[in-house]
Amino acid sequence: MTHVKLSVSLAAAPLDQIGTVVQMLTTAQVDYLHFDIEDGVFIPAITLGTKIISDLRPLTPLPFDVHLMMVNPEWLIPDLVHLGANRIAVHYEACPYPRRTLRKIVEAGAQAGIALNPATPLPDLVYLRPYLNFVLILTSEPEAPDYPFLPTVLEKVRQGRQQPGLEGVEWVVDGGIDVQNLPWVITAGVDTLVIGRAIFKDNAILANLHRIRQVLSEILPHATSA
């Protein structure tokens, strides 16, 4: 493991400065911009909608990483790709036919991911593999923005990496990640970190991003996935 990607969660950003923030993150060359699209049903929150994707798309070449925290997500997929989404994750818990939903994402022209809430055990994902590009593991409960990081959930990443047939799948974690728990996360074998609060803390975006990258550079040469 020589590189871990950063997907910056804009749900934690100061939305009154969002254009400036996106330009700053573009200059800083993060790997993805992450959008949580919620419906108030699957989780009791509505933070970002689809309009922000279309409004920000002209401002940056960065890939848009969209996490649909909603029931019945299929209807929205073609519109999201049209608006500029490059990759879309849907929840395993919200899709009675996840293979069909992932196929719809791929056929629309985006990478497809399956997301798992902390309480959901890792299922057998091999049957999804023809359409599965990445797995998004939530490492904090999604009900509130300040729920703590749950280190035991990282076991799902270790288990997934050992599933025959999932070679090449990208493993993503999202929720409560900061410089204190980065060593645990990296050791689990994660490919991509979704980070929000730790980057936007005290509105010191570039300083926080620099610190995260510094810690990663110290950990990665010594990290071995379990």
Image (tube, helix red, strand yellow):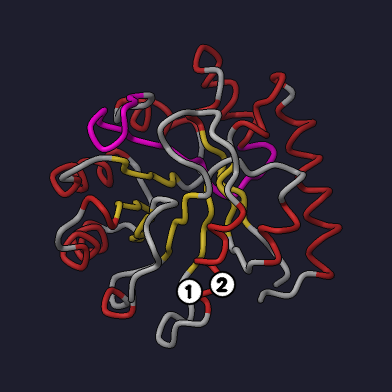
User: Split into 4 quadrants, where in the image is the C terminus?
Assistant: bottom right
Name the residue type under label 2. Arg
Residue 37 lies within the magenta run: yes
Q: Position of residue 220 (x, y in %)?
A: 78, 64
Residue occupying the point 52% across, 58% down? 172
Mark 1 and 2 residues: CB-CB less than 8 Å, in contact?
yes
The quarter holding residue 200 reads top right
Q: Which dot marks residue 160?
A: 1
Residue occupying the point 23% across, 32% down? 41
Q: Position of residue 84 (x, y in %)?
A: 34, 42
Q: CA distance from mark 1 to mark 2?
A: 5 Å
Please report the bounds of the magenta region as a residue range.
Answer: 26-46
Residue occupying the point 59% across, 21% down? 20
Q: Of helix, strand and loop, which one carries label 1?
A: helix
Q: Position of residue 173 (x, y in %)?
A: 53, 54
Q: Position of residue 171 (x, y in %)?
A: 51, 64
**Label 1 CA crowd tier, 10 Å (few <14, some 14–19, many 20+):** many
Q: Is residue 213 above or below residue 57?
A: below
Residue in the foreground of this view, choosing between 119 and 42: 119
Name the residue type under label 1. Gly
Residue in the foreground of this view, choosing between 168 and 197: 197
Q: Which dot marks residue 158?
A: 2
The quarter holding residue 127 reads bottom left
Residue in the foreground of this view, choosing between 160 and 64: 160
